[in-house]
Structures are given as C-alpha cells and as structure tokens.
Image (cartoon, rainbow, N blue to C red):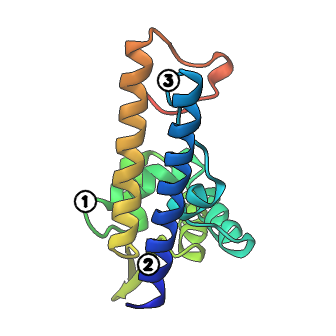
Amino acid sequence: MNAAAVGQSTMRARVRALMVRSLERNSDTGREPRAVYDPAMARARSPRVDARLAERLADTMFALSTPSRVQILGCLLDGPQTVTELMDVLGMEQSAVSHQLRVLREHMLVKAERQGRKRMYALYDEHVLTLLEEALRHVEQRSKSRGRLGLGRRQGGAEAVAE
C-alpha cells in the first residue's frame, strides 16, 4: 500500500471512530445523532490552495473580470479571428481590442499566430475552453436559482451578466 492509501485509510478510521463516539454519546442522552465536524476531514476533502497558487488563480480571474475581454473570448469560441474581425463583431475600436488581447495573451488565455501580415487570435488551449464553459454554466445555474427564489438583479448594476 502506498503512503497516500495508508493516509486515506487512517483518515477513514478516524472519521468512523469519531462518528461511533458521537452516536454512543447521543444514545446515552436520548438525543438524535448529529453530524460531527472534523477539521482534518474537511482539509482532506478540499485541497489547500497555497498563497502562490491563490495569487496566480486570482490573476487569471482578474483577466476575466472585464466584460470586453470575456466577449473577445466568447468570439474566439467559434475559432481563430483577426483583430479586424473582432472589431466588427464587437463594435470596439482597434486600440481597445488590441489592448484587451494583450492582457489575455499575458495571462495565457489567448495565443496569436502570424498568417502573412495578419495575426490570428485563438483560445490558448482546451483549459480555457473548459474554464469558459464552466463559468457560463455557473452563471446560468445562478440565474435559474435567482429566478426560482424571486430575486432580481442587484441594485446599482453590480452584475454585468445578462440574465
């Protein structure tokens, strides 16, 4: 058995022991058993994010924090495009599109390849596609939940996503 498997079986044994002790205590008092919070188990379930990784992740999220950059990525879901094509679709100035593409390139969300005198921009890799798909799914689910709860948009336009 490798070290990870030993660690997992030890963790399972600790959780079982805590649950049994809790059930025994609750049966003595006649109360219904309740869940026991075990900090070690919580740490085992959710991987830790160290400070360096958190900073890199926040930096990537920063790149996605501007609607125009998200719109550019949305256009690139259909395949590689030039700055001119992006300008036409989004109705943005060339300088604005180029600036946003530079930010997206620096964060490795898009890549550029020369084709003659033009540069074709595309999503950096499949991870970016997955990130966008999951973000869209999250927004859609949140919108559905808000609708079921009778909640509308936040005051002051805090949510830039069309619901």
Contact (CB < 8 A) between labels 2 and 3?
no
Mark closer to the observer (2, 3): 3
Q: Name the residue tied to disc 3.
A: 32
Extreme front residue here? 28
Give amino acid for label 1: Asp
Report the label total. 3
Q: Secondary structure at mark 1?
A: loop
Residue found 40% across the figure and 75% down from its top: 124
Mark closer to the observer (1, 3): 3
Mark 1 neighbour class, 10 Å CA radius: few under 14, some 14 to 19, many 20 or more: few
Q: Is residue 12 above or below residue 163?
A: below
Residue 14, image quadrant: bottom right
Q: CA distance from mark 2 to mark 3?
A: 58 Å
- Mark 2 vs mark 3: which is more N-terminal? 3
- Mark 2 vs mark 1: which is more N-terminal? 1
Q: Name the residue tied to disc 2.
A: 111
Q: Secondary structure at mark 3?
A: loop
Mark 3 neighbour class, 10 Å CA radius: few under 14, some 14 to 19, many 20 or more: few
Q: Is residue 148 above or below residue 91?
A: above
Q: CA distance from mark 1 to mark 3?
A: 56 Å
Task: Give the percent coordinates (x, y) of residue 42.
Answer: 58, 55
Residue found 40% across the figure and 23% down from its top: 145
- Mark 1 vs mark 3: which is more N-terminal? 3
Extreme right residue here? 51
Query: Viewer-proximal residue, 142 or 46?
Result: 46
Residue 117 makes an appearance in the image: no
Q: CA distance from mark 2 to mark 1?
A: 15 Å
Residue found 66% across the figure and 65% down from its top: 59
Per the rendering, the mark at residue 78 is 1
